[in-house]
Image (tube, rainbow, N blue to C red):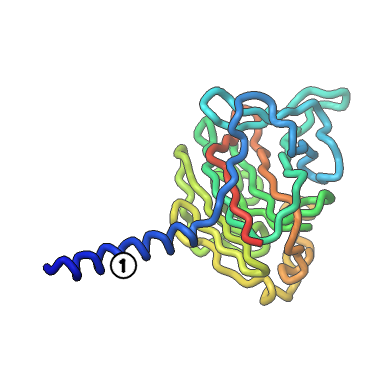
Amino acid sequence: MSLMRYVVGLCAVAAVWVANAQSEPKFEKFFTKPGVVSEGWVVRDWVDISLPPKWPVVWEVDADGILYGTGRYAPGASGERWIGTWLLSQKEYGDFILELDFKFKNGGKTGNGGVALRTPLVGDPAYEGLEVQITDERFERSYFPNATREQLSGALYLVSPAKELAYIQGEWNSYRIEARGPKIKVWLNKKLVQDVNLETFTKPAKKHGKGEELLDAKPGAQRPLRGHIGLQDLSESGETLTFRNVRIAELN
């Protein structure tokens, strides 16, 4: 190879490297310090995020960088109360890439939670914004024996079913979520499980009523394109949903 061709080749490689570096979005890492999470985040009730938890609950980061909430079944004056919670950003986001790992600490048999996208700070994020579902199928079917893919991990909960079931029991799982206007892509363990345009979801979505009853909810086309992001643990006693490596890149 001549010296000139070698130099030209090096320049071409360098140009590709620079282009790739420039196209890589800048990520902000969350929850990098051990201790109770407070600044920039709020803990809210799992049913209606306009309300505080019904029992004292905190979210904290341990020495290994693992994030978890202290929600549990707890005794109260009128019996046990379910105190799963949402940890929600005070900041609103529009277009972004959100990445995180999640794992049920004790195997997941009674594990449930989710990731809120673009939710207002009112109502249930699954119905007012979007919720990317996190659940163990054993848990989901214990409550809803006829659960569909719209209720399992990888779903936009009761809006769009996962293309395939990619959740791995007992292991760390990873989500990559891209929100660009009405277009939502979700990868679960590097498998593309959502690739949708919310503008095409014009028929009513669903929400839970009593038991397995499903009622009409806002269509995907009416879900907001800007709002808060959040993490939920709604596991029963004996289980905890944990998170790590949570980071976001804003695209607008």
Q: Is residue 141 visible?
A: no
Q: Is residue 185 left or right of residue 201?
A: left
Image coords of residue 198 (percent x, y): 67, 70
Q: Nearer the viewer, residue 2 or 80?
A: 2
Q: How many marks?
A: 1
16 to 189, vertically: above or below = below
Residue occupying image coordinates x 61% and y 47%: 140
Residue occupying image coordinates x 67% and y 54%: 131
Q: Nearer the viewer, residue 14 or 139?
A: 14
Residue ranking furthest to the front: 4
Residue ranking furthest to the left: 1
Q: Which of the 4 quarters of the picture holds residue 63?
A: top right
Residue occupying image coordinates x 79% and y 39%: 44
Quadrant housing the N terminus? bottom left
19 to 89, vertically: above or below = below
Q: Which of the 4 quarters of the picture holds residue 109?
A: top right
Q: Is residue 144 left or right of residue 174?
A: right
Q: Label 1 crowding class (10 Å Cα cut-off): few <14, some 14-19, many 20+?
A: few
111 to 7, vertically: above or below = above
Image coords of residue 134 (percent x, y): 59, 47
Image coords of residue 122 (percent x, y): 84, 50
Quadrant housing the C terminus? bottom right
Q: Nearer the viewer, residue 17 or 91?
A: 17
Write down the residue under mark 1.
Answer: 12
Q: Nearer the viewer, residue 64 or 173?
A: 64
Q: Amino acid at mark 1?
A: Ala
Q: Is residue 172 visible?
A: yes
Mark 1 element type: helix
Image coords of residue 97 (percent x, y): 58, 56
